[in-house]
Amino acid sequence: MSSHMISIYALIAMFVLATALPINMGVIAFVGAFLVGTLVAGMTTKAIMAGFPAELFLTLVGITYLFAQAQNNGTIDWLVRLALRAVRGRVAAIPWIMFAITALLTAVGAVSPAAVAIIAPIALGFAAKYGINPLMMGLLVIHGAQGGGFSPISIYGGITNKIVQKAGLPISELTTAFVSLGVNFAVALLLFFMFGGMALMRQRQGGPSGPLPAFNTQVAMPASGPQIFDESEGEALSEERLIIKRSPDALNASTAPATAGGPGATGAGAAASAVPVHEGATMQQMLTVLGLIALAVLTLVYKLDIGFVAITIGLLLSIIAPNVQKRAITQVSWPEIMLIVGVSTYVGVMEKMGTITFVGHSVAGLTSPLIAALLLCFVGAVVSAFASSTAVLGSLIPLAVPFLQSGTGVDPIGFIAAMAVSSTIVDVSPFSTNGALVLANAQGVDRDVFLRQLMIYGGIVTLAAPVVVWFLFVVL
């Protein structure tokens, strides 16, 4: 067996092992890089470490550190409260408010499972209280998180853009971002009308349950922060492993402790702290919003490094309120970062071995470049439905680079956008963390029926999405 095939089989084995067992794939990938690099490729440790993505590491640390600051000082809950007050009794607007908030959270740097875990309990609590279809509400939350996931300052966007830039391929960061947002919005719009949106548009003031609640009291905040939402394990979370449970009633309580899960709960599932939120924004919250705006301006307009800028803004916020922000460094999404840099290091070993070029030329040698592009989109969708989307992006896009460089006629910008959407929109599957969080937080439903609905919808998306985005952004 050739060294190229050994490295490919090792990568497949990593996905299988990380899916079957609750082990961070980044740890497996680091070990794989060491074993394959030394035993198969005869590489030195220095050569293996040369593939460590230092710039990407700094980007991920910076943006998740800044997001942890925003969650600690109540900025996230303040934004949620403002958005819901803007509803003014229009029940039909609630699902779209949830869609927009999760899109905003991932767009400014939250990992997708973190955004879903923050918003899903609130959204599904409203669904139960005001007669909104819980499946529609949960799916809009997930599609919102995926829709905002490829902004230039997001984690998905950072991974994708840096890989494409490193390969020297033409890139349009905003194209990928707007394609992801547009596709997920279109799907969300279809779901809205399929699951009772027209009836909601004729309903005001929460229907039989009374008016929408006020949002001027205390909100439960997770004690351990975003790092608990472990997409890196790529496994479905059972109801007993529910990380956070919140409801509209909890938002109105004078004291709102989060409800922890069972013995399997992790991180913040064990404890929560009540962070007071006020009718108006605090100085910390206003400064945090200004910091997020500054991050976008400095990185998009002035092209400064996003990692350094995010950490700098995070440090300034910590200096202003050190007691509130002292937990922020522990709230960085270390599991996801471990996953991403581990997989990237292993891909670096494959690149030095020549495996990336080998796979690219093999794909390019297929009869039709368009069929090859469709195949890659399908692989990304199927693998991501069961494993981590971040791992898929970090491994499949580099594998496609030689194919795109070989003059097949496939537009790299359109293909990257199609691959990005194919690999993330399938996170509605109950076998992914996002889908499992929605399942765990659904209220007043038959769990078995709800699970089957998620499975059917996830299967449809996994089969249909790659074809649709391939046709729209690669063929046309």
Image (cartoon, rainbow, N blue to C red):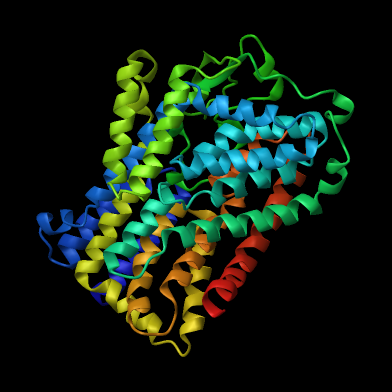
Residue 142 location (% of width, % of height): 61, 46
Extreme bottom residue here?
367
Residue 236 visible from this viewpoint? no
Residue 466 location (% of width, % of height): 57, 68
Residue 445 location (% of width, % of height): 78, 37
In which quadrant will I find the C terminus? bottom right
Residue beneath the point at 89% across and 27% down: 208
Q: Is residue 242 above or below residue 164?
A: above
Left or right: 2, with 188 as reference point: left
In which quadrant will I find the N terminus? bottom left
Residue beneath the point at 33% across and 68% down: 8
Left or right: 191, with 427 as reference point: right
Residue 15 visible from this viewpoint? yes
Q: Nearer the viewer, residue 303 or 49?
A: 303
Q: How many marks?
A: 0
Residue beneath the point at 48% across and 65% down: 417
Image-quadrant location for residue 6:
bottom left
Q: Is residue 254 above or below residue 84?
A: above
Left or right: 46, with 270 as reference point: left
Residue 441 location (% of width, % of height): 66, 34
Q: Is residue 293 above or below residue 260?
A: below
Extreme top residue here?
254
Residue beneath the point at 76% across and 29% down: 88
